[in-house]
Amino acid sequence: MSQNYTAYIGSYTFHGSSQGIAVCDVDMENGQMTVRSEVPVNNAAYLTVSADKRFLYAVVDEGIAAFRVLSNGNLRHLNTAGIKGMRGCYVSTDKRNRYIFVAGYHDGKATVLRLNQDGSVGDITAEIYDRGVGSVAERNFRPHITCVRLTPDEKFLCVADPGIDQVKIYRFNHEDGSLRMVDIIRCELESAPRHLGFSPDGRHMYLLSELKNYITTYDYNGEGSHPEFKFKQLVSTLPKKYNEISAACAIRMSRDGKYVFCSNAGDDSVGIFSRDEESGLLYQESVLPISGEYPKDIILFPDGRHLASLNQDSNSVTFFKIDYEKEVLMMHGAPIRLDSPNSGVIVPLPEN
């Protein structure tokens, strides 16, 4: 029996016709999606799914909205919990679905909340306002947290702040949900570290810098009393001859860890990078247009052969087939219209 999937795409709702979260049927064989219905929420800025794929969480104006993923792909609202701050922009969970982590762009706040056994969001266990001064007026001269993710061993929480060009590292206490800062990765001035991810084996971290348009590779070692992040490489996200204004948006890794993909606004493209699994080094293979404007996020299909680009300014989702032999993307099928898409995930449906 083949596995069935549903995609969820979060959108802004302050203009246009989007209601918040689009529920999409997924045609895995052809790498396509079809909007089935929409779930009304206010400005779904970012989505994530729990490690066991049973629950979906969305950043909304009121805080974090929690949903149960039903067997037919529909969503059942569990609750919406406040974060005692301005609207977030990123959310992630731990592997045991005990905690949820929220990044606050507007107020520079990282928030940790407990998750209940039924998947609903509980009380706040930690909240930290970032401090510091950046180097560019108007854009990054004050804290703006854009990513909060645990290291693969879940000992530490990485908090990316493009406002002050730093990634702060906190030891995470799984018993009470508290945070204690233990290290700071100081990035190049005006680079704006935006999102980060780790290799499947947990040995390498990849940090996407929005304003400098590059990915930084680090070796990661969490075996000691303090984490170790060793710089290895910078690789541009842009084509070699591109010299206009651009901003790196999203970074994703293939399931097998052999490729990294990133999107660029301005250039309106997706870059493909092959990855040496032993050294962790990346090699730019191609950077190709996404036939849309402002690819805020990209979704890799579970089959590893298809990719979707969520194009916020052109109100569209475009689809591509990945040719790994030629290391290129080929536009595949018709786009779907969706106002202001921000973030998306594909979730395997429960059998019962």
Image: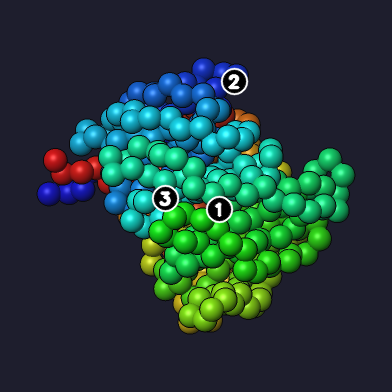
Residue at the image position 47 percent from the left and 21 percent from the top: 19
Q: Which residue is mark 2?
A: 14
Q: Nearer the viewer, residue 162 or 239?
A: 162
- Determine which quarter of the picture holds residue 271: bottom right
Q: Residue at x 68, y 66 (%)?
A: 184
Horizontal and vertical percent position of residue 266: 71, 44
Alpha-carbon span between mark 1 and mark 2: 25 Å
Q: Alpha-carbon distance for marks 3 and 2?
A: 29 Å
- Residue placed most toward the observer, 259 or 109: 109
**Residue visible at 78% across and 53% down?**
132
Relative horizontal placement of residue 34, taking residue 258 as reference (left or right): left
Amino acid type, callout 1: Val
Identified at 68% across, 57% down, the residue is: 193
Precedes in sequence: disc 3 or disc 2: 2
- Identified by mark 2, the residue type is Phe
Q: Position of residue 272 (x, y in %)?
A: 55, 60
Disc 1 marks which residue? 148
How packed mark 2 is, by other alpha carbons closer than 10 Å (few <14, some 14-19, many 20 or more), is few
